[in-house]
Image (cartoon, helix red, strand yellow):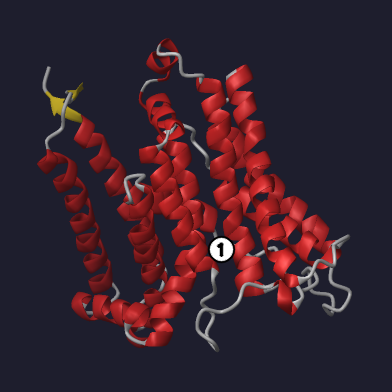
């Protein structure tokens, strides 16, 4: 048995295999529901009801999708150039950190503080990813290892700051930063509910990435670099420079997730600010087949699964961990589907 490349996959193959992957995920989830003693149709119905069955549920799903759109875009941009950014979690925390520092230490009024925090977050996230990319370009160091390890380095650094220089003296001993002033926070879209204008910013970023990838020279260079870096160099594309630009964009997008969580939702920085948004962004990007507009749909789907699973767990007494299994299976099946759109299995 061997794998043979497919020069031009048919539309049926490109669309049918991902659809089959999602169907296999549903079948697996149904089996797990039955093992837990629940009716699969009722379980899926309760997930849908918990994710979009009311105004509160729908807005909570949109709120949960906001950081996933940012991290999904970050991964999609990087992966398109074959830059394997596994460090979106570190870039998220870098964005959250500078957001808190600028919001609490500079004394800027709200109308100036919010754009300053967003811009600083983009720069910080880009710089965090810039180091691994320069190591890759100059020394050939595998960026999977360096970006992954940076997640743990950043987590320990944040813990140190929250137990030391950034610890809130009024926090009753809890490891958290001082809260942002009220006028330095993103306003709510719906008064009284948690959805904030970070969601709109995420949609604007998704549209901007799509325009960049499809309508600009940089987007063409990113795609060419990802498809064949040797051919791109031969055509005169500065591959190293393109990877650096890609890193700055990708890291900046991931850092905006940290900015939106602090300025739009939490109000301060804690060690558990992210329950793994950076890692989940990989699932979001892969389910979207790295398409920036598809990332929005994928993020809403993933967020709906998480939000709905919490409601389903309470109603059907099925463990909410089924959502984690569901998403992990979806990623594995989707990766296999993407592989089989490009190669076929032949004998001999």
Q: Position of residue 294 (x, y in %)?
A: 33, 53
Q: Nearer the viewer, residue 196 or 35?
A: 196
Task: Look at the image and tell me in which quarter the C terminus lies.
Answer: top left
- Residue depicted at x 77% and y 65%: 103
Q: Position of residue 187 (x, y in %)?
A: 60, 77
The residue that label 1 is drawn on is: 275
Task: Look at the image and tell me in which quarter the N terminus lies.
Answer: top left
Question: How many labels, in total?
Answer: 1
Badge 1: how crowded within 10 Å, few (<14), some, or many (20+)?
A: few
Please tell me whether residue 38 is drawn above or below residue 270 in the rendered image.
below
Residue 117 shows in the view: yes
Tell me the SS state at disc 1.
loop
Q: Where, by quadrant of the figure, is residue 116 drawn?
A: bottom right
The residue at the far top in this view is 234
- Residue depicted at x 22% and y 31%: 342
In the picture provided, is 264 more to the left or to the right than 216? right
Q: Where, by quadrant of the figure, is residue 262 drawn?
A: bottom right
Residue 270 shows in the view: no
In the picture provided, is 203 more to the left or to the right than 131? left
- Residue depicted at x 21% and y 48%: 18
Please tell me whether residue 133 is drawn above or below residue 321 in the rendered image.
above
In the picture provided, is 125 more to the left or to the right than 49? right
Please tell me whether residue 53 is drawn above or below residue 270 in the rendered image.
below
- Residue depicted at x 74% and y 65%: 113
């Amino acid at each position: 048995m061997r794998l043979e490349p497919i020069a031009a996959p048919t539309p049926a193959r490109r669309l049918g295999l991902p659809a089959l992957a999602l169907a296999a995920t549903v079948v697996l989830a149904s089996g797990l529901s039955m093992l837990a003693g629940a009716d699969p149709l009722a379980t899926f119905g309760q997930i849908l009801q918990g994710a979009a069955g009311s105004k509160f549920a729908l807005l909570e799903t949109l709120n949960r999708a906001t950081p996933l759109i940012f991290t999904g875009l970050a991964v999609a941009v990087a992966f398109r150039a074959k830059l394997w950014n596994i460090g979106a979690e570190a870039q998220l925390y870098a964005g959250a950190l500078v957001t808190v520092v600028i919001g609490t230490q500079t004394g800027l009024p709200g109308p100036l503080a919010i754009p300053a925090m967003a811009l600083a977050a983009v720069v910080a996230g880009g710089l965090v990813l810039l180091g691994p990319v320069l190591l890759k370009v100059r020394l050939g160091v595998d960026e999977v290892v360096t970006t992954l390890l940076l997640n743990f380095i950043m987590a320990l650094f944040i813990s140190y700051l929250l137990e030391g220089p950034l610890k809130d003296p009024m926090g009753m001993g809890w490891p958290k930063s001082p809260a942002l002033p009220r006028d330095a926070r993103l306003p709510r879209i719906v008064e009284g509910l948690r959805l904030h204008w970070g969601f709109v910013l995420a949609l604007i970023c998704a549209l901007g990435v799509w325009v960049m990838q499809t309508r600009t020279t940089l987007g063409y260079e990113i795609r060419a670099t990802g498809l064949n870096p040797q051919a791109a160099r031969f055509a005169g594309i500065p591959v190293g420079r393109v990877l650096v630009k890609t890193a700055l964009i990708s890291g900046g997008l991931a850092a905006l997730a940290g900015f939106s969580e602090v300025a739009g939702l939490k109000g301060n920085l804690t060690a558990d600010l992210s329950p793994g948004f950076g890692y989940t962004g990989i699932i979001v990007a892969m389910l979207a087949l790295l398409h920036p507009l598809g990332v929005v749909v994928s993020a809403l789907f993933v967020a709906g699964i998480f939000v709905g699973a919490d409601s389903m767990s309470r109603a059907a007494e099925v463990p909410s961990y089924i959502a984690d299994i569901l998403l992990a299976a979806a990623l594995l099946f989707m990766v296999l589907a993407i592989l089989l759109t490009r190669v076929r299995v032949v004998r001999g």
